[in-house]
Image (tube, rainbow, N blue to C red):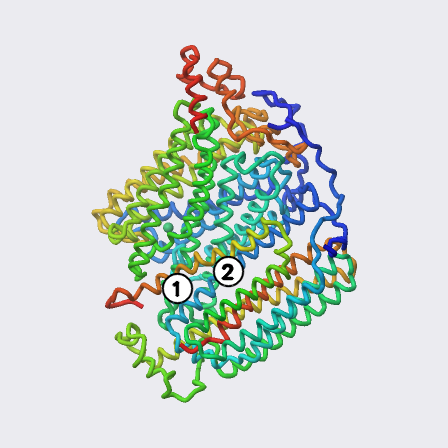
Amino acid sequence: MASVPHDDHGHGGHGNHHIPKVSTYLANYVFLMVMLVLTFAVAQVDLGALNIVVAVLISVIKTSAVVLIFMGVKYNSRLTWFWASVGFIWLFALFLTLGDYVTRQWVHLPIGW
Amino acid sequence: MSSIPLQPGALGTPNEQARENYLNIKHTVASWLLTKDHKRIAVLYGLSISIMFFLGGLAAAGIRVALVRPHDTFFSSEAYNKLFSAHGIIMVFFFLVPSIPATLGNFLLPIMIGARDLAFPRLNLLSWYIYIIGALITLGAIATGGIDTGWTFYVPYSSVYSNTDVVAVIVGVFFAGFASIFTGINFLVTVHKMRAPGMTWFRMPLFVWAMYATSIVMVLGTPVVAITLLLVVLERVFGVCIFNPACGGDPILFEHLFWFYSHPAVYIMILPSMGVISEVITCFSRKRVFGYEFVAFSSMAIALLGFFVWGHHMFVTGESMYGGMVFSIITFLIAVPSAIKVFNWSATMYKGNVWLSAPLLYAIGFIFLFTIGGLTGLYLASLAVDVHLNMTYFVVAHFHYVMVGGAIFGYMAGMHFWWPKITGRMYPEGWAKLACIIMFVGFNLTFFPQFILGFLGMPRRYHFYPPEYQMWNILSSAGASVLAVGFAIPFFYWMWSLKYGELAGPNPWGAKGLEWAIPSPPPSHNFDSVPIVTEEAYAYEEIYARELAGDYSDSQVDRPVSPLNTEQPDQKTLEDHSSTEESL
Amino acid sequence: MSSAQLEVAPQRLAHQFEDIDQQNECYIVGMWTFLVTEIMFFGALFLALTVYRSVYPNSFFEAHLALNKWLGLLNTFILLTSSFFVAMGVRAKMLGQNSATQFWLGLTILCAFGFLGVKYVEYSAEFREHHFPGPNFHFVATQPPGGDLSANSQVASGQPNISSRDFPAGYHPQQLELHKRQLFFSLYFVMTGLHGLHVIIGILVLGSIWFLIRYKHPSVDDYMTLELAGLYWHFVDIVWIFLYPLVYLIGRQ
Ligand SMILES: [Cu+2]
């Protein structure tokens, strides 16, 4: 049944937010550039169906680099980690729609798309 | 539970009403329109959705009038199409989706977790303004010509062929979607970060859990329907080709995307009601909720599992048969967490010291109607049965049992339960019970015949029907007029109570929870000092024991002595009660 | 860690929060929750792209050849660079270095305009060649018909379920082929257009912050404003990271 008096409004303070080094940002940028060249180079090679897999994989790596370093999720709380991954994870639910398209023609129907 | 001294059952005094609260702190119009106080925004939202409910209800009345006669009715077929579209769009996007979250949720969520406000008060106000803009655009479009696509906006009719103002309506719905996204973001962050010291996840009231689950659905689902409807607009305006089968598109893709939101949207409507019911039932049974964790997790399970069932709307559209089977199975699975809730509510009332007040009456009505709505959903989830029932009045009856019988009864239960907290006045109990009974009878009379109509094969959205269906339609229309009376009565006694209602003390029901520990109506800053929570939610044991001993001073309202107490409190009942608690 | 010695500039506390850390985390988590909605928003478009690409692989391959992958590459480079710039800007603002912030922010906005400029060049070429969907849509295959990419060979080889069907009157395979390409361009214009809209919103947001910092407005004393705008800008970059390979670099099936 205790209570703590709440602070008066309008005052401030310093957060303990992590400030990354410039070299970290620079290294990340160089890494992204290498990945960009790789994206383009791989697309010039005919890997068949693997092309899109590799392209998406590289995009995921690039995205992770942006999210973790530039967006600072690496230095943030677990809650931020959680919400930063929720969107990407939940895309899987949406992409379950593809199951319909994969299986739609397993049964031959006289009409339909 | 908090540091605020509480006199249990104390009557509000005129002196107390003069105390500064969120209502009387300022009276100017600007102080309302520019407010950042979550309680005032809740009131603004409450007024707006009430207007939308009235307009949607008018459209429904038009539909029921038209269906009294099989042919040759009061409306042209075009007008009829516009009526049911307006009814669906207004009720779904502008009433049901914001109903409990934006009003009761906005008002109570911060107070229940011991916060001074939501995390983002300005975003909250912005949400209301966006909602109003969306509502005005949609209402304007409906008033100046209407829309005839139904609330589902199925392509290619909506994107190519309809001659009505689809674009404006969709833009309005788009705005409403953003309003609900902003509410969802606000609630999520608030629940995560703004809880008072000691308010752990498993001490949160179940209403907060329900709001959290609802917000997840809002955040994950709404953007998908927003982009889908935007694509319809682009197809209509710029002639791009995404869904139109005439140029290689797949209209079923539209249905996938639309229902990816719109099935979970059903849970946006029903989960908050379930949260309200948990609060009401525990309070008026004077018992801790049976299986707290199960009720909390079933909310989350419904919210998340609800994202994997959308394909059950498309069993007969040309969706893959195998997809249909999977969606059917998962739809059956989602009945499990819903059933857990119904079971736990019943178990909570069992051996409770039940006080049959108006909120509880509404809550029991909810359980009854939601059970019917849920069970008939299983008929529709069965692949074979759905072939017969799809697009018939059976579907209409089913989702009205869930959305009106469920969502609106839950809303009414919550509005009555927290009316003293929000306004500082009691509503007239007798009238409230009468309205509840009229509503319940009217509701069943309206929608039960529609199950039969659907089973007999009457398709939904049709203006004309064979004369043999007329009897059931007349019954349904008669029920609708009873239902309308039921909805009108609360409007009048609530207005009356604002001026003449008995003054409410801080805790008229003897309820547990932080919101009952602060004055009614609450002060602008909610808490004078940050409360420190030291106990679980719903610790009703002491009150239960007192009431069994004949001491009813915890509640302000004259509480009828329950049959349990006609005899002397016997030790066995008390022990029984505490042992049920421990066995959980 | 050496960077821990860098001190974050002071911030102001809003009334609903208890301390600065709670406030900062609320803002960052709130922004991420908003980005979740943006991810789902664009996710639906990527889903549509995946669906149609898997159904019409050859037409999509053929249609995408009309896009300029070099300009796409240039734009990806520009956006990734701007992401770096804005990260530097946020860092400077965190340390309270307002002029450095303005410098990095200025570069970011310059990049954003550069991106839109390149997009304008691409769009105008596509409009000139009637690649915008609608009644005037027109598409001449860049490779002479007869190869394994032509419409007829596609009908002959794969896709039995689509090609062996009787089409309604007026839909000849040749016309259907045109429709499929139009579908690609519909998705291309919608996706790049909505992304471009996000770029424009980003310019407006970052631009107003630049001006507010320039005129020392109190609302940007707190670095959090820029931090959140930065998160948004990085997200715009992420969308393009996926858009570029999936739209400009479609592989042969
Ligand atoms: Cu559903």
Quarter of the picture containing the N terminus of chain B is top right
Query: Which SS class for mark 1?
Result: loop
Q: Is residue B316 left or right of residue B571?
A: left
State whether residue B437 is above or below residue C51. above
Q: Which residue is mark 2?
A: C41
Position of residue B137 measured from the top left corner of the image (x, y, whole percent): 52, 56
Q: Is residue B302 left or right of residue C35?
A: left
Position of residue B451 measured from the top left corner of the image (x, y, whole percent): 28, 44
- Per the model, the C-alpha gap separating discs 1 and 2 is 26 Å
Q: Nearer the viewer, residue A105 or B170?
A: A105
Q: Which residue is mark 1?
A: B162
Tell me the chain of label 2. C
Kind of residue at disc 2: Phe
Q: Residue at x 34, y 34 (%)?
A: B441
- Residue B213, visible in the rendered structure: yes
Q: Nearer the viewer, residue A45 or B76?
A: A45
Tell me the chain of label 1. B
Position of residue B574 measured from the top left corner of the image (x, y, whole percent): 44, 17
Specify the quadrant of the image occupied by residue B158. Answer: bottom left
Specify the quadrant of the image occupied by residue B500. Answer: top right
Q: Residue at x 64, y 32 (%)?
A: B531
Q: Residue at x 54, y 27 (%)?
A: B512
Quarter of the picture containing the C terminus of chain B is top left
Q: Residue at x 62, y 32 (%)?
A: B522
- Residue B519, visible in the rendered structure: no
